[in-house]
Structure formats: structure tokens, C-alpha cells
């Protein structure tokens, strides 16, 4: 398993295509959630993924403060191969990226409620009541670095 961390400006067209194909397949098609999945925040992001011989196995993006929240954030977390701890590994890599690239002291996320335990295990704490975003229950969570 190979870890890749690239700023948007460093991505090849093939890498960007594979990232968008995966994110759309999961967040739009699989979750039956029509929304603008590709957004301007991608241009400010570091894109983090674990890859194997089949391609991207897990993905996340890391954003500097002021892009989606006043603090740095991570999001678009996907594990293609579920129940293999790849989600935990890519979240840890995203947290490390926020710390190293942005020098951030805090990370804010909006997590789908079903994934709360993944983020709690990584050190995030719930900071909001449950709310609906794009038809899916979410909560805000934060981590102090």
C-alpha cells in the first residue's frame, strides 16, 4: 500500500480523474445524494490517498483554515475496501498533513453520523447536534492538535 499526498496543483489529470470518479461514485451515486461534489475547495486542498495495484483504496482531502471552516478541515473521506482499517489510516494521514502543511492547531469536520466512531477513535469530539446536509444526518466534530 502506497501513501500519496499531493496538492491540487501537483495532481496529474489521470489522478484527478480517478479521485473525482471515486468521490462521485460514493457520495453521489452510492449514497443517492445529488449535490455539487466537485467544488472550489479542491483547488486549495491536499489530496491524500492510499493506493494498491487496483488503484485508490482510501482517500481524503485536507483544507487550510478559512476554506470551508475558520479552522483547517478534512473531508471527503472514503475507504473503498471497508472494514480493513484503511479509513483510519487515511484519516490519520490527513490529520498529519493538516499539522505539517498548515501548522494548524485545530481541525473541524462535518461527519456523517454513521462514521462518528471512526473520527472519535482518531481523537475528534462532537461539537454540534445532529443536522441534515444533502439529505444525510451529519454532526460537526473538532480535534485540537
Image (spheres, rainbow, N blue to C red):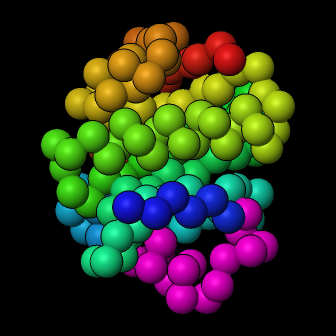
User: In the rendered image of this protein, does residue 46 appear above or below residue 36?
Assistant: above
Residues shaded magenta: 7-22
Image coordinates of residue 119 in percent, x first then y, are 40, 25
Q: Is residue 136 visible?
A: no
Give me the residue at 73% from left, 32% from top: 99
Between residues 94 and 25, which one lies in front from this camera angle? 94
Judge from the rendering whether residue 73 lies leftward or rightward of residue 115; answer left or right. right
Image coordinates of residue 118 in percent, x first then y, are 33, 28
Check the picture and name the quadrant holding the N terminus.
bottom left
Between residues 71 and 131, which one lies in front from this camera angle? 71
Give me the residue at 21% from left, 45% from top: 84
Q: Looking at the magenta stretch, what is its main secondary structure?
A: helix
The reply to whether the magenta stretch includes residue 21 is yes
Give me the residue at 16% from left, 43% from top: 83
Between residues 68 and 53, which one lies in front from this camera angle? 53
Toward the left, the furthest residue is 83
Judge from the rendering whether residue 44 lies leftward or rightward of residue 49; answer left or right. right
- Indicate the quadrant where residue 130 lies: top left
Toward the front, the furthest residue is 1
Image coordinates of residue 18 in percent, x first then y, are 45, 79
Toward the bottom, the furthest residue is 14
User: In the rendered image of this protein, does residue 13 appear above or below residue 117?
Assistant: below
Image coordinates of residue 145 in percent, x first then y, are 68, 17
Q: Is residue 4 visible?
A: yes
User: In the rendered image of this protein, does residue 134 appear above or below residue 19?
Assistant: above
The reply to whether the magenta stretch includes residue 42 is no
Judge from the rendering whether residue 117 lies leftward or rightward of residue 63; answer left or right. left
Give me the residue at 63% from left, 59% from top: 5
- Indicate the quadrant where residue 14 lies: bottom right
Amino acid at each position: 500500500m502506497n501513501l500519496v499526498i499531493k496538492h491540487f496543483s501537483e495532481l496529474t489529470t489521470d489522478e484527478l480523474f480517478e479521485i473525482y470518479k471515486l468521490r462521485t461514485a460514493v457520495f453521489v451515486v452510492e449514497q443517492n445524494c445529488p449535490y455539487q461534489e466537485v467544488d472550489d475547495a479542491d483547488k486549495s486542498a491536499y489530496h491524500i490517498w492510499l493506493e494498491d495495484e487496483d488503484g485508490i483504496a482510501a482517500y481524503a482531502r485536507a483544507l487550510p483554515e478559512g476554506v470551508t471552516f475558520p479552522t483547517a478541515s478534512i473531508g471527503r473521506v472514503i475507504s473503498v475496501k471497508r472494514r480493513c482499517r484503511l479509513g483510519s489510516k487515511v484519516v490519520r494521514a490527513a490529520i498529519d498533513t493538516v499539522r505539517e502543511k498548515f501548522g494548524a492547531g485545530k481541525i473541524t469536520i462535518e461527519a456523517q453520523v454513521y462514521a462518528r466512531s471512526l473520527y472519535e477513535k482518531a481523537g475528534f469530539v462532537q461539537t454540534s447536534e445532529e443536522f441534515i446536509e444533502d439529505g444525510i444526518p451529519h454532526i460537526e466534530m473538532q480535534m485540537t492538535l
